[in-house]
Amino acid sequence: MVNVTINGISLQVEEGTSILDATRKVGMPVPTLCFLKGINEIGACRACLVAVEGISRLVTACNNTCQEGMVIHTNTPRVREAGRTNIELLLSQHRINCPTCERNGTCELQKIASTLPIGDTMNYKHEYPEDNWDTSLPIIRDESKCIKCYRCVSVCEKIQSLNIWDMVGTGAHTSVNVSRHRKMNEADCSFCGQCITHCPTNALHTRDDTKAIIGVNGVLSDPNKVVVVQVAPAVRAAWGETFGLSPEVATEKRMAAALRRIGFDYVFDTNFSADLTIMEEGTEFLERLQHPGDHKWPMFTSCCPGWVRFLKSQYPDMVGQLSTAKSPQQMFGAVTKSYFAKKIGVDPKDIVCVSIMPCTAKKAELDIPNINDAAEGCKDVDFSLTTREFCQMILADQIDVTALEEEEFDSPLGTGTGAAVIFGTTGGVMEAALRTCYYVLTGENPSADETFKAVRALGSDKPWIEAEYNVAGHTVRAAVANGLGNARRLIRAIRRGEVEYQFVEVMACPGGCVGGGGQPIHFNEERAAQRGQVLYNYDSANKMRFSHENPEVQALYAEYLGKPCGELSHHLLHTDHHGWSLPMAPVFDEDVRLN
């Protein structure tokens, strides 16, 4: 332990404690912009400057540790003036259009600036750099909002191991852009969106597709279109955060009511197609398990488009090990424009399928050719909106969600099981699949709460977790990883022969979909664990815990598809991952990517 004094308050802290953490302990935290604990501790923004007696210069609190007898001041005139000057300098190169900015209210620069006596005039001339970004991409970069904190660089390097972003230029012209002088469409980006959720401003954001839905010429205003919306499992765990609502108020049924107020003709639940995915992917896995010599191992799940993009660009020789099952988003669209279109007697071309997803990579998934031509020659899904875009539509329509009565999802594509809802958290796809595989092999349901609980990876500090099960004489060795850096570590271990598995689930975002790049953003906070628990609570409360028990999925097979992995279901619900390509990863020692 070391003894320090902060603003006249004496305290003891453990050796190695940062000055930043110590100021938080005494209730006088210094502000930060670039700081991400354990990821980006470089003191680049200079927002956390403090005075230390005996040191002539001001020091950054985030990357300096407390020393015995240190006397620290966070509120001297010199510290205040330095903090104000540094924020003014950042604002001088930051386009200040806060009222219309997507991050208004969740911008960390705005938050700090509002606490300082900057006033209406600043001492520095505003100069905005020019920008030339392809705005058709799922991830948009606005150079005029960048404060050069390098969070995106560090997150992409240390968490996702893709190194898409880098510092470019020198001196006053230093900035952040795509690494190795590439354009974004030339880079091996997964479009996971973690750079967006960790950006303190709006320098990185998602392409806004809400105008195509609710704008003057949006699809909701076209009387000749039937507009169907599906909502992913993880969305229900986070949408209420935008409005300061607890999960008990921001329920899935109140979410369905809000979507009807916005104007959608049919409101469905992606949990339905998550159950459908288990029937297809689980059947595919069982076929491989029963004929092990015919396949390469392991079989990888294919629900996460960010992960699929990662595997295709980094390890293209392993693409054949991906499940051919489409993601729940795409399966839903295929069923909507075939089975459902026949149900309601509408030409599939007159149906517009919209998805609400916690994900930015889903926007790119819509345009993969061989994923989108199964249902009557139409794209499976026409528009994919993030959770943030969904909440923005609620705000735009002035809907008071607390005044809404709960409403059910529409039928026949609105019923989901507990197994489906945990798709939204890491380990959920694996657990849901194993529940149904167990039933198929043994003829009875396992304990939904205990049998496969070991594959729940949320909160684990390991690169991946593993579990081994014996099901009706079949040994199933399973692994679960979340975050693409962890996925890379797992794949390296597999390729080196250090581990062997039959079934592997990977989610691109830390924590799984609940931590997705399209979820609500909070000031330097990670909320995946809390959101994941919300989904497990939904699972426990559901009367149906197994995908094979979903009556609407059963009806779909009985009335239309025939059987899982049958001829029609394979045509509609599966894809050929070899049918589309991505920019390949640069060739160099993989150890560099994993530090």
Image (cartoon, grey):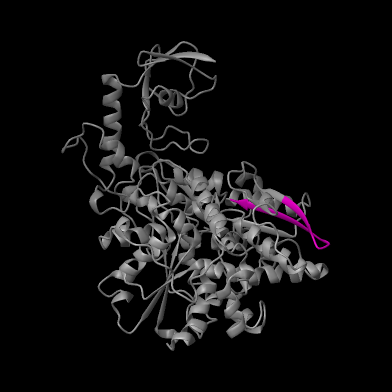
Which residue lies at the image location 58% right of the left edge and 79% below the top edge?
555
- Helix, strand or loop for the magenta stretch, by majority: strand
Quadrant holding the C terminus: top right
Residue 184, image x, y percentages: 46, 59
In terms of depth relative to the viewer, which is nearer, 416 or 377?
416
Quadrant holding the N terminus: top right
Q: How many marks?
A: 0
Asked if 276 appears above or below 23 in the picture, the reply is below
Which residue lies at the image location 38% right of the left edge and 35% below the top edge?
45
Residue 266, image x, y percentages: 40, 75
Asked if 38 appears above or below 530 in the picture, the reply is above
In terms of depth relative to the viewer, which is nearer, 272 or 242?
272
Check if residue 477 falls in the magenta segment.
yes
Which residue is the extreme one toward the left?
A: 120
Which residue lies at the image location 75% right of the left edge and 62% below the top edge?
297
Check if residue 226 falls in the magenta segment.
no
What span is colored magenta in the figure? 467-482
| Residue 41 visible here | yes
Horizontally, residue 566 falls left or right of residue 519, namely right
Asked if 13 appears above or below 574 in the picture, the reply is above
| Residue 324 visible here | no
